[in-house]
Amino acid sequence: AQTVTQSQPEMSVQEAETVTLSCTYDTSESDYYLFWYKQPPSRQMILVIRQEAYKQQNATENRFSVNFQKAAKSFSLKISDSQLGDAAMYFCAYRSYTGTASKLTFGTGTRLQVTL
Amino acid sequence: DTGVSQDPRHKITKRGQNVTFRCDPISEHNRLYWYRQTLGQGPEFLTYFQNEAQLEKSRLLSDRFSAERPKGSFSTLEIQRTEQGDSAMYLCASSFPPFDGSSYNEQFFGPGTRLTVL
């Protein structure tokens, strides 16, 4: 079974600064997807960024980028030019590349605070 | 609004009572997922449907839990004889199915139903 670990329960960043959230995972599969989801307080979870394991290039979405290290099974999220609206719980998630379920396996989350 | 909706948003019940939650997926999404999120944890997969067929159930889904999607549209999750350990946020998500076994379609999440069992 796959596991996802987020070792930072809370992080804080000043507005306009950069912050990196860490995620490690364990799997015996060679092909899979990795995701970062954002869950704002009392609001629904939304997808921030996705990485396919077979792609060597790190995914980027505007101010969000990842550092995907397949051999180390590491998948960190970098948020540049942090904004107050970035404050939320961030979850790292894993999905097998094949199979019918496409269920997501989540980490325990990192709460990001953004200060002025 | 064309997002995933869930009803109710909050439910408080006494131990031993039955509760039922509803999820309305994004129209045309024929995959529907249920997850449970306890305090301080990430969501955990419970079950999923493709159309009206329930294709997978997690071992977390004890025999007190039952999920249905009778017409392949909305889904209900019922918990019988609730226990305090059932207190959690119950999340629903929907997506299109993969075009093939390896492709990906984003799961869109609803706001969740927060259950408190006293």
Image (tube, coloured by chain):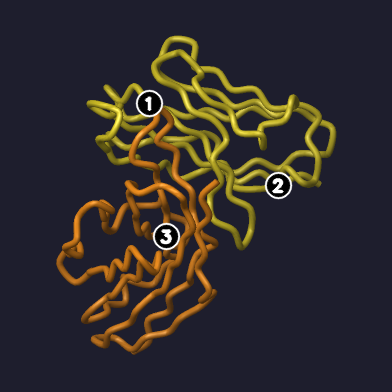
Chain colours: A orange, B yellow
**Label at residue B87:** 2
Residue at image position (53%, 73%) is A7
Quarter of the view holding residue A49: bottom left
Query: In the rendered image, which residue does mark 1 sit on?
Result: B31
Identify the secondary structure beneath mark 1. Answer: strand
| Mark pair 2, 3: CA separation | 23 Å
Q: Nearer the viewer, mark 3 or mark 1?
A: 3
Q: Is residue B89 above or below residue A18?
A: above
Q: Amino acid at mark 1?
A: Arg
Precedes in sequence: disc 1 or disc 2: 1
Q: Is residue A12 above or below residue A79?
A: below
Q: Position of residue B83 (x, y in %)?
A: 81, 40
Chain designation of label 2: B
**Label at residue A92:** 3
Q: Nearer the viewer, mark 1 or mark 2?
A: 1
| Mark pair 1, 2: CA separation | 25 Å
Q: Amino acid at mark 3?
A: Cys
Quarter of the view holding residue B51: top left
B116 sits to left or right of B52: right
| 3 and 1 marks in contact (CB < 8 Å) | no
B54 sits to left or right of B18: left
Label 2 Cα crowd, 10 Å radius (few <14 / some 14-19 / many 20+)? many
A91 sits to left or right of B113: left
Q: Are the residues under marks 2 and 3 on the same chain?
A: no
